[in-house]
Amino acid sequence: MPRLMAVSLTEQQVRARTKTVTRRAGWRMLRPGDRLTLCKKVMGRRRGEPLDRIALVEVISVRREPLNAITPADVAAEGFPQWTPAQFVAFFCHTHRCQPGSEVARIEWRYLD
């Protein structure tokens, strides 16, 4: 059974299939070949609120790296081709309450649908 992953901050990019990489705090258990169901929201749903499944993906690679090691190509793969790495790092730090040098999991996937 695929694990669930929330993509509320990049829902549009996932729906458009322009996002193929994500960065996450934690996620140490993930391995290449694992499948993920990308959802609008996973935790914090109200009782009876349905799970909005957006896409099924297969993990291609997972590695740990400092957030500020992101490249322009990966910023685009995150779904933000118009942003610089510095803009992406500022966005991530603001939304995840971390520091630019924080270690994150870089997760790459392919869409299965």
Image: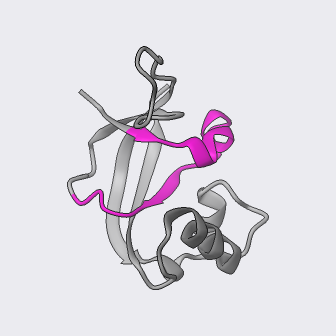
Residue farthest to the top? 48
In the image, is 30 to the left or to the right of 79?
left
- Can you see residue 72? no
Q: Position of residue 29 (x, y in %)?
A: 20, 54
Residue 47's image quarter? top left
103 with respect to 49 (left or right): left
Colour approach in the figure:
one colour
Q: Position of residue 50 (x, y in %)?
A: 47, 17
Q: Which residues are magenta?
A: 5-28
**Of 66 and 109, the residue lying toward us:** 66
Q: Quadrant of residue 58?
A: top left
Task: Answer above or below: position of 15 versus 19.
Answer: above
Looking at the image, the residue that sits furthest to the left is: 29
Depth check, front residue: 107 or 25: 25
Residue 53, how many percent across, how many down?
48, 24
Q: Is residue 29 left or right of residue 37?
A: left
Q: Residue furthest front?
A: 47
Q: Is residue 40 visible?
A: yes
The image position of residue 4, as x and y in percent, is 36, 35
In the rendered view, tell whether residue 112 sits above or below residue 31. above
Q: Residue at x 25, y 52 (%)?
A: 30
- Does the magenta-highlighted stretch encompass residue 29? no
Q: Quadrant of the N terminus?
A: top left
Q: Quadrant of residue 17?
A: top right
Furthest residue toward right: 82
The residue that appears at 50% across and 70% down in the rendered structure is 97
Q: Residue at x 37, y 64 (%)?
A: 25
Question: How many numbered marks does the figure carry?
Answer: 0
Depth order, front residue of 66/71: 66
